[in-house]
Amino acid sequence: MRVVAVDSVSISIRGGEVLLIMGPSGSGKTTLLSMMGCILHPTKGKVIVDGRIVNDLSEDLLPDIRKRYFGFVFQAFNLFPSLKAVENVAVVLRLKGWDKSKIREEALGLMERVGLGKRSYFYPKDLSGGEKQRVAFARALAANPPIILADEPTANLDSRTGREVLELLKRLAEDS
Ligand SMILES: Nc1ncnc2c1ncn2[C@@H]1O[C@H](COP(=O)(O)OP(=O)(O)OP(=O)(O)O)[C@@H](O)[C@H]1O
Ligand SMILES: [Mg+2]
């Protein structure tokens, strides 16, 4: 069966901008984000990242584009349960080949930045939903990407914690 998940969408996003996409379940938000993040290809239309049309790029160039431009935050957090909060952030820096002492300093700094310095050595299971969400943001920031794509980052949170996470997003965009 053919499913049209996203149709007639045209948006452009500038640096420092925070864009919220709202719509009912099944309306195509995740699909749109996945296309923006070069995870899915649109059947028609163009995705342009930093002036470059990415549709035509071959599969083997896409991981580099994703790494260079995007940080992803998923609704289900996807933190590693066996790693402490700060280690979840450090993983990204280790993948980038940073040396140990620099990794520690940077990862702890990112935990501070999302307001979780005091929770750095907690395991994910000992953190609240909003705190886990913030660790996920710290991890996305560790790669220092120009664009962060977050899929329903507040869906599992109460309204106050949800507002806090949105405030954090706005602050991060302003700092960028
Ligand atoms: N791989 C797929 N194959 C076929 N249809 C799909 C696929 N992925 C999503 N869809 C359909 O495309 C539509 C959009 O899905 P999408 O996940 O983008 O919605 P959403 O707005 O993120 O919804 P939610 O708020 O529930 O997360 C839905 O009708 C869904 O059933
Ligand atoms: Mg979705």
Image (tube, rainbow, N blue to C red):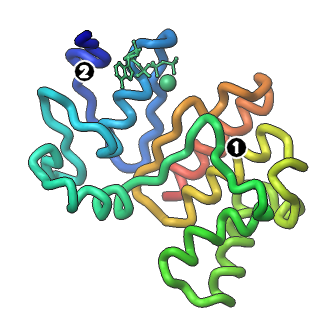
Asked whether 80 or 44 is in front, the reply is: 80
Q: Residue at x 28, y 59 (%)?
A: 65
In the image, the residue with mark 1 has its CB under 8 Å from the nearest atom of ligand 2: no
Q: Residue at x 64, y 81 (%)?
A: 103
Mark 1 burial class by Cα count in 10 Å: few <14, some 14-19, many 20+: many
Horizontal relation, residue 137 to residue 11: left or right: right
Secondary structure beneath label 2: loop
Asked whether 127 or 40 is in front, the reply is: 40
N-terminal-most mark, 1 or 2: 2
Q: Residue at x 39, y 34 (%)?
A: 33
Mark 2 burial class by Cα count in 10 Å: few <14, some 14-19, many 20+: few
Q: Position of residue 159 (x, y in %)?
A: 76, 23
Amino acid type of the residue that numbered disc 1 sits on in the rendered structure: Gln
In the image, the residue with mark 2 has its CB under 8 Å from the nearest atom of ligand 1: no
Q: Eyeballing the image, is 19 above or below 118?
A: above
The disc placed on residue 117 is none
Q: Eyeballing the image, is 96 above or below 168?
A: below
Quadrant of the image containing the N terminus = top left
Query: How many marks do you count on the picture?
Result: 2
Q: Position of residue 138 (x, y in %)?
A: 64, 58
Ligand 1, by image quadrant, is top left
Amino acid type of the residue that numbered disc 2 sits on in the rendered structure: Val
Q: Residue furthest front?
A: 1
Q: Position of residue 30 (x, y in %)?
A: 43, 28
Q: Which residue is mark 1?
A: 133
Q: Which residue is mark 2?
A: 9
Horizontal relation, residue 154 to residue 14: left or right: right
Q: Position of residue 74 (x, y in %)?
A: 56, 40
Asked whether 107 or 94 is in front, the reply is: 94
Secondary structure beneath label 1: helix
